[in-house]
Amino acid sequence: MTEHRNVPSISITDSALATIAAESTRSSDGLETGGILLGSETAHAIWIRHAGDPGPDACRAPQNFLRDLQHAQQVAHEAWTCDGSQWIGEWHTHPFGDLTPSELDLDSYLRHLHDPDLQLDYFVAIIVSGNANTTPLAVAWLIERHRAQEVPLRREHA
């Protein structure tokens, strides 16, 4: 992972954080879970306003997670209708591992970044500890085409 100067600040609403905290407890079974992140951006700031749950048809495994795409599209549509939020990334748990993106995670993020239909300049990833015995910990990552960097996540009280 490389350091990048001019990293935008990342803020998350209480409601998005509450969704992530509630859903992350599902990883107490040893399987990853997660959802999409929706919000907006400027040159200097990223706001995460909504976090999706995995959806009823998500595929969960010990070292990977595939969201329910139709469910994610519905969550994205509702967020867009509500406040113009767009898809900016994903969150998921690492039940037993550290909170850095795995090679599988990075491959997935880079596929999104290189998809010309998505037109993404960066991808926000939040990785959450899935241990039921502790308070969930979350680490935010800003993924760009040639680097990934841990970034501070600021709670935005709405």
Image: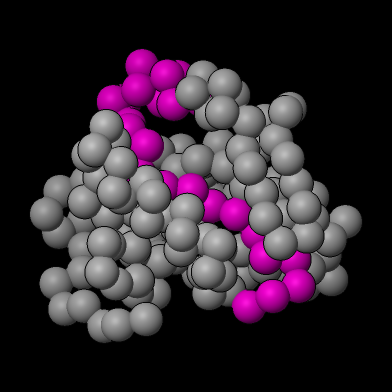
Residue occupying the point 78% across, 60% down: 62
Left or right position of 69 against 88: right
Left or right position of 76 against 62: left
Q: Was residue 94 drawn as part of the magenta stretch in this picture?
A: yes
Of the 4 image quadrants, the one containing the N terminus is bottom left
Relative image position of residue 11 (x, y in whole percent): 35, 56
Relative image position of residue 154 (x, y in whole percent): 38, 63
**Residue closer to the observer: 67 or 117:** 117
Left or right position of 82 against 135: left
Relative image position of residue 51 (x, y in whole percent): 51, 41
Q: Was residue 137 drawn as part of the magenta stretch in this picture?
A: no
Seen in the picture, residue 17 relative to 130 is either above or below; the reply is: above
Residue occupying the point 70% across, 35% down: 58
Give the magenta-colored segment's residue range: 75-98
Left or right position of 13 against 127: left
Of the 4 image quadrants, the one containing the C terminus is top left
Residue occupying the point 45% across, 19% down: 78
Q: How is the image coloured?
A: one colour
**Residue closer to the observer: 86 or 47:** 86
- Give the total number of marks visible in the rendering: 0
Query: Residue 40: which quarter of the image?
Result: top left
Residue 148 in sight in this render: yes
Residue occupying the point 27% across, 62% down: 144
Residue 158 in sight in this render: no
Relative image position of residue 87 (x, y in whole percent): 37, 37
Seen in the picture, residue 89 relative to 4 is either above or below; the reply is: above
